[in-house]
Image: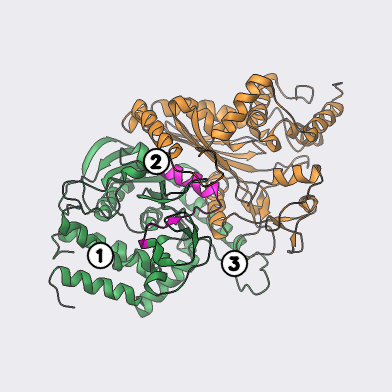
Chain colours: A orange, B green
Amino acid sequence: MIAAGVPAERAESLAEVLLYADMLGIHSHGVMRIARYIECIRSGGIHPLAPLQILEESPCMMRVSANGGLGIPASCEVIRRLIKKAGSQALAAASVSHSDHYGAAGYYALKLAENGLIGFSMSNTCPLIAVTGAAAAGIGNNPFAYAAPAGRYRAVLFDVCMSVVASGKIQLAADNGKPIPEGWILDCTGKPTTDPKEIYNGAIMLPFAQHKGYGFAVMVELLSGVLSGAGILDGVHSWNMIPGEDANTGHFFLAINPKFFGGLETFVSRTEEMIDKLHSAPTLEGVKQIYYPGELEFQSEARALKDGIDLPQSAGEALAKAAAAVGIQI
Amino acid sequence: MIAAGVPAERAESLAEVLLYADMLGIHSHGVMRIARYIECIRSGGIHPLAPLQILEESPCMMRVSANGGLGIPASCEVIRRLIKKAGSQALAAASVSHSDHYGAAGYYALKLAENGLIGFSMSNTCPLIAVTGAAAAGIGNNPFAYAAPAGRYRAVLFDVCMSVVASGKIQLAADNGKPIPEGWILDCTGKPTTDPKEIYNGAIMLPFAQHKGYGFAVMVELLSGVLSGAGILDGVHSWNMIPGEDANTGHFFLAINPKFFGGLETFVSRTEEMIDKLHSAPTLEGVKQIYYPGELEFQSEARALKDGIDLPQSAGEALAKAAAAVGIQI
């Protein structure tokens, strides 16, 4: 990223957020994304030096423009400032406009949780999902995440998109040449398909739980797109490669400070109590244990810290492509 | 409700919230609930005169106990105060503990939206849903709603619970003697069933979209239960009839004021733009039009305003039962 013209501090943010995803086993949002970021930078669609611009600010909020810069370093800077605000306020929120792909939504929520806050993170995307009754993609596969401090359980962490499965998983299936189950996507003409390659050919994702996934996608659009001043629905351009234009992706972050609601210690011990209860449920036949949200991801993280990250082949190929693009031998 | 010992102002809140649900076509959360509220009051499980107690307060938050009183009037009072707070703050939130059933979650979110705010409303409930992998109910069918002002479109309104369908719908099916599709519930031994009467026999609801519904249910539990100081998971007692104990249901409300994020007018016109775009999507064969979240409910509300409310028979029977319990002839 530094060889592509990204300042060192921003490259560090990129490394941290992308490695977070790989460590938690979410390779679709890991280092393999570097290749696309570099493509966008080299074509002039993302400006790696764009300064963060504060449009409005109060002790509990900030409205920010990323000015067509990289979504990840902009979001990391916003989270640093939000943590400060939420230290002295029961609630603090930040919206970001004129941004781009911000990586795994859960990273930012977890960062807030690691600082004793209940954190929320969400972003709109270009249209990828057919809303209920529609035959074309009309709304983004808007990621939504929350996290909360949980004492001896590291954190509660939940990170989802609005489709039945993440597009990254379909891309991985395509890269690995494996078919996908029916009901995940429609092809570009609105017909069911099990060919994951259709994702590169205008396929339409379907929302989870029909109108429920649609409704949650609209919630993210209202906060990340409408409220922030970013693009709305097809006003967002994914992986923007057009010089002089920006993707105009929007993000929204919210922090709730339990210090103001009975105290952090009480909140953490009560969260532990909640997890203990979830763990103690009788299991279905063949199920070994109940997981709390985030538990499987943290197990993957612990393995990665011990043994290193086991990257899929497609990630290695993407990294090699990125390196070649900026003239680095790996 | 007045005949059952509820002060007139609180009875008015109950009438407004329950009629809201009936007008929007959500009869499961309408006036039919009065019978259960009266049963709880008469058995001593709900105290209709319990004073609202402010435990913590700042310009942007309040933590409240309903002191074992009725959930609806307590929540209406909290929403009135939250609207005032959010007038001068970008964000305001309130948590409620020691409460009971608060009716349709969407009412409170819509009330905030009618006052120019983006509103969120949620509540935990007694365990009704099997979390992913579990063979018993471990978490509530926690309702979650949001609403936003939308100019010529009245509002955006989304109100869901975490099960594949609302328990009220299963109860209506049971009352009407109709079978339900497989995949909605398990019977009390963990086996699939299409008999809606199992809902009165310890049936276990299943979360929407598997782990996604589970994760959203935990989000509501963290804010409504853990943060508020209310009961957590099986610490909540539905339709409490035990004198001296309370249901200890918890609620959480959040208001975001667009005035601080670029202005209300801009937000409203951009929300209209979003809805226009959603409406303009090409439809699947056989689909007449695309609806935005809340549109169908507002159509029902408009019909009710014009022609009156068409109550299901079970609601009439529940009202007659309630009237008889307090010695009123209807």
Are discs 2 and 3 both within one chain? yes
For the N terminus of chain B, the image quarter is bottom left
Secondary structure type for disc 3: loop
Mark 3 — residue?
B290
Residue at screen point 85% across, 29% down: A325
* First in sequence: mark 3 vs mark 1: 1
Mark 1 — residue?
B34
Vertical placement of residue A125 versus B277, above or below: above
Q: Nearer the viewer, residue A279 or A258?
A: A279
Residue A30 % position (x, y): 70, 32
Q: Which residues are magenta?
A: B200-222
Taking the image as shown, residue A109 lies to the left or right of residue A165, namely: left
Secondary structure type for disc 1: helix
Under mark 3, the amino acid is Ile
Residue B111 % position (x, y): 36, 56
Residue B258 % position (x, y): 46, 46
* First in sequence: mark 2 vs mark 3: 2
Q: Residues within 10 Å of mark 2 (few under 14, many from 20)?
A: many
Q: Residues within 10 Å of mark 1 (few under 14, many from 20)?
A: many
Residue at mark 3 to residue at mark 1: CA–CA distance: 35 Å
Q: How many numbered circles does the render carry?
A: 3
Q: Chain of mark 3?
A: B
Residue at screen point 62% across, 34% down: A66
Residue at screen point 70% across, 38% down: A28
In the image, is residue B84 part of the stretch drawn in magenta?
no
Q: Chain of mark 1?
A: B
Q: Nearer the viewer, residue A274 or A77?
A: A274
Mark 2 vs mark 3: give the one in front.
Answer: 2
Secondary structure type for disc 2: helix
In the image, is residue B206 part of the stretch drawn in magenta?
yes
Taking the image as shown, residue A90 lies to the left or right of residue B47, namely: right
- Tag of residue B223: 2
